[in-house]
Amino acid sequence: MKIVVLRSKKLKKQKWGEYHQSFDTLYADRVIGNLCNRRDFCAACEADCIHCREKYDWRFPENIAAILDFPSVLPFVLEKPGKHVPANMPAHDVLLAIHIHEQILLEILARCGQWGTKGVAVPLEAPGWVSGSAIRQALEICARNNIEISFPKPFCSFNPPRGGVLAEFRKSFRIGFPEVDLTIKNGVIAEARVNVSAACGATYYVARWLVGRAISEDLKSEVISRRFHSYPCTASMEWFDEPGNTPLHVAGQAHYGILPAARVGTVASARPIITPLGKVLPMPLPVSDNIRNIEHIKKAIMDELEIHPKISLEQIKKKEHITPALFYWAILLLKKEMKIRTRGTIIIKS
């Protein structure tokens, strides 16, 4: 199977204007890094790294027919979107379109019939990546040309029906809704083998930390949630009316499916959470509360940095009674906003 990746990329000559918008470039880089299985792709474990991905030896550069780059800064409305569309497209089965201008996307979809495209995957890691009207037009264009198309929100929820080209794409490239085989011996997870990973590679990181843990433990919160939230996930924390959640939260829930018991009474249900030992836990906080708490932590960190040029992680943890997941998300967001940088366990104001 061959794919063509469409992505936005920062170009040398890009003009900003009042009516311009920017497109995410980080997520496409992570997806391509995952597909090519670059050795330096993941550094989440830092000193604890055991090179867990090497045993799979999954590399798909030869299956990527082309990576087409589009400007990461463009006007909201393009007078001639067709000028950005290549005259010819390499032979392929599936187009993977990662946050490109929606007018360019529609122009490309209109020509897919002549290129022999069988399927199109358009991951939405944030609500504003493609508008609802553009999605409707895309669905109509692909229906007319007998082309499968999917808009997973986010890519972690990508689990198309069996028998189609997109299901084959997920299986062949091993990206989409996470799928992990667990080998359990004497009540302990002896092996966690990834069959399908989140496109950003987070599933390998989560699975690596499941090994050696007893199935009687609260693996959802103590391993999956904790490790997932400390991985540099690029899913947005903005509210999505459909599926009625944030992409980040949906991605986290998808990883709960790694545990067989997690498929009963998931976080999205109205029932309490029950651990494998039968312990009843309270329902998680609403997403709005988590977002508010993260903003509170971010403010506490920046306030402390106004007093001291360098602070330690433990210094903040002692002052703020917070969960590790929320704390590390605050750190990641501040780094993404280029307000701080870290050196080991030291936080430094940028």
Image: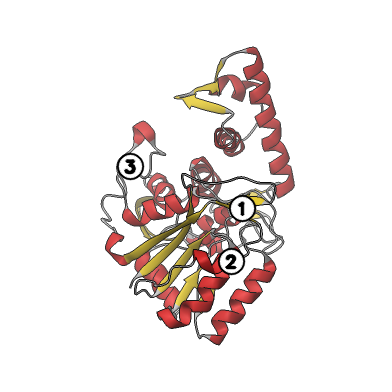
Per the rendering, the mark at residue 249 is 1
Residue type at mark 2 is Lys
The answer to whether residue 161 is left or right of residue 269 is: left
Rendered-image quadrant of the C terminus: top right
Q: Secondary structure at mark 2?
A: loop
* Distance between mark 3 and mark 2 Cα atoms: 39 Å
Rendered-image quadrant of the N terminus: bottom left
| Residue name at image x 65 percent, y 16 percent | 306
Residue 319 against residue 274 in the figure, above or below:
above
Residue identifier under label 2: 80
* Distance between mark 1 and mark 2 Cα atoms: 37 Å
Residue type at mark 1 is His
The answer to whether residue 170 is left or right of residue 312 is: left
Q: Secondary structure at mark 1?
A: helix
- Earlier in the chain: of badge 1 and badge 2, it is 2
Residue identifier under label 3: 40
